[in-house]
Amino acid sequence: MSRTLYDKLVDAHKVCDLPDGDMLIYVDFHIMNEYTSSQAFSGLDQKGLSVWRPEAHLSVVDHVNATRQRDPHDAASKLLIDNLEANCEKHNIAFYGLGDRRQGIEHVVVPEQGLVAPGMLIACGDSHTTTYGAFGALGFGIGTSEVEHVLATQTLRYKRLKTMLVKIDGDLAPGVTAKDIIMKVVQVVGAGGANGYAVEFSGSAIRAQEMSGRMTICNMAVELGGRAALIGADQKALEAIKGRAHSGTLDFGGLEWNSDAGADYDTEFEIDAADIAPLVSWGTSPDQSVPVDSLVPAETEGMTPKAREALNRALDYMDLKAGQAMIDIEIDSAFIGSCTNSRIEDLRAAAAILKGKKVAGSVNAIVVPGSTYTRLQAEAEGIDRVFKEAGFDWRPESGCSMCLAMNDDIAMDGERIASSTNRNFEGRQDRGARTHLMSPEMVAAAAIHGRIADVRDFLSEGAE
Amino acid sequence: MPKIVHGLAAALPLANVDTDVIMPKRFLITITCEGLAEGTFADLRFHDDDTPRTDFVLNTRPWHGARILVVGDNFGCGSSREHAVWGLVQLGIQGIIGTSFAGIFYDNARKNGLALPIVSPEVRDQLMQAASHEDGVSYTIDIENRIIRTGETELPFDMDDATQTAHLEGREDTLNSLEFADANRNYERGLDDQQRVRVIQ
């Protein structure tokens, strides 16, 4: 019988059925960060349990660390970082901490280190663990109680998800990126539209994406509710895992990690790649986005009272007026970073827009490379100079930084940020902060204009 | 874990309430699960100067003592932070009635005995409207029979079998799963050497 990639991955990792209807699944590899793991280690201690297989875990410092300098910016963040290091030392778990060349945002570090391969099952106490689906691996986020469970058993209690196929065929127009693809998918399926589903992406527009773009797409699948995201393994995925620190040590198979022809999905969506424009979020949910050259949405006749209230609440928080042009919106800050868009390919693409240009005088522009290796590679390519000459603050350390503002990169009340990140929630970048999600190229364009800008205008300038 | 949740219900009609809103990030810089009640819905509950916002339902009578929330679609979306569930429980919330919950939030709730009955949009709207009445209304969430009771009315809800069992048995999942250690060792014996991740220290 034809099976989906998702079902193949679940079947291959099933340890046993449980009496209550769930199953135990085996976790090949588990990643921890400093903010969702402390209580899990405490739980082990309280129950007198040990770590089942210490070598199958990696801890990376990324969420709370400062990126202006290496040392923690305050005592509280130092406590979290030191606590993780002490727990890892006690349990003999690999720890990539501050000052380690392998440190960075966990979902940037793992592919860089060759710790993801097609056919693996990867869990992490972070919702954006869906990123690994780009390699034909099953990755998903878990809570702290589940972190404890993986540490103690190397398994999770699991319920099989429903399957959703999102097929995107056709060619993208110039200036349209992987970020726009996934923001379009979130818009079409809705912010909770994939709750209870594993989402598989297919089609020629997905195949055409390099691994970096595929990771961006799978990363943000959680913003439509997908508990897992998947793209079938192909030659690009197999090439991308070669030549890394762990490459020779792992082999879970290869091209068999694809859905069978004729496999059934519980629901399917089709999107024409040609219909996707560079998108910008206007509201406080990732599905509230519009093409950059259009207007802030207004109430429509058929709108339910609930939809009307949601629209007006978002407009009020964002301090926007229905019907105003998106490209008129002035920004205070520009941020390039996060597990969604901080890889070397993202930095190169943004630098191509910035080259020879200056950030508008009023804009506070920051770029935080996704990992220490990424930063060193960018510096070797001279990308850091392009950013610095344009007026960006090129951060010497890596981490999540202003994506969720758990370090000292905190937005001011009312500050408006063009951001290459994944969530525009109320208060995400701090209380009262107004986040506009977009591609890194679009953040660069906005930084130059001092207002939301259409990256396509910069492409035609280059062509002249 | 309670098999029956009974108490005053408060309506929180917003859709897509994310875990950043439930537990803002400034309360996450901690290595324990304690003291999170004050952080729960902090930006909705308090002004900048920490005075209560009177436009938030849990700050108004009679709902300041609510034990049950009736919520909009896609509650608990976003970050995996279990702190959101710890905080809700510490605030005294024992059940949240909605149409859909984000997956990680749903699993985190189960681990902490927070019941999340799933109902149809029509039933949710009905319960939300009743919960908005100024006198307040109490609901009973009967987990064993998967029924919400209010007055003479009984409304069925969805909850998967494993989650229901976890609530009814009050089971500690980690210890329970270790009872299946033999199956786990069998599975591991079937792995090739290159299917065993060994992270370089």
Image: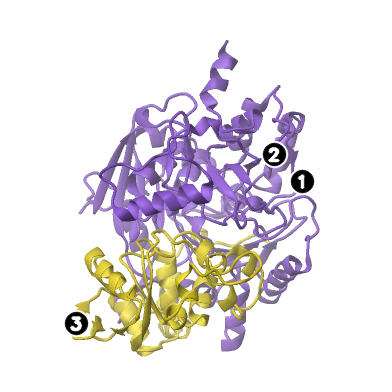
Q: CA–CA distance between discs 3 and 2?
A: 57 Å
Q: Position of residue A265 (x, y in %)?
A: 25, 51
Residue A302: which quarter of the image? top left
Q: Residue at x 69, y 45 (%)?
A: A373
The residue under label 2 is: A365
- On what subunit does the disc labeled 3 rest? B
Query: Looking at the image, can residue B118 be seen?
Result: no
| Three-letter amino acid code at the position of disc 3 | Thr
Asked if the residues shown at circle 1 and circle 2 are in contact, with their CB atoms under 8 angstroms apart, the answer is no
Q: Position of residue A55 (x, y in %)?
A: 60, 67
| Three-letter amino acid code at the position of disc 1 | Pro
Identify the element where label 3 is drawn.
strand
User: Which mark is on residue A396?
Assistant: 1
- On what subunit does the disc labeled 1 rest? A
Q: CA–CA distance between discs 1 and 3?
A: 62 Å
In the image: residue A66, left or right of residue A168: right
- The colour with which the image depicts chain B is yellow
Q: Position of residue B6 (x, y in %)?
A: 34, 87
Q: Nearer the viewer, residue B46 or A121?
A: B46
| Residue occupying the far top of the picture | A464
User: Which mark is on residue A307?
Assistant: none
The residue under label 3 is: B153
Eye-nearest disc, 3 or 2 = 3
| Three-letter amino acid code at the position of disc 2 | Ala
Identify the element where label 2 is drawn.
strand
- On what subunit does the disc labeled 2 rest? A
Q: Are marks 1 and 3 on the same chain?
A: no
Q: CA–CA distance between discs 1 and 2?
A: 14 Å
Crowding at dot 2, Cα within 10 Å, few <14 / some 14-19 / many 20+, comes out as: many
In the image: residue B129, left or right of residue B109: left
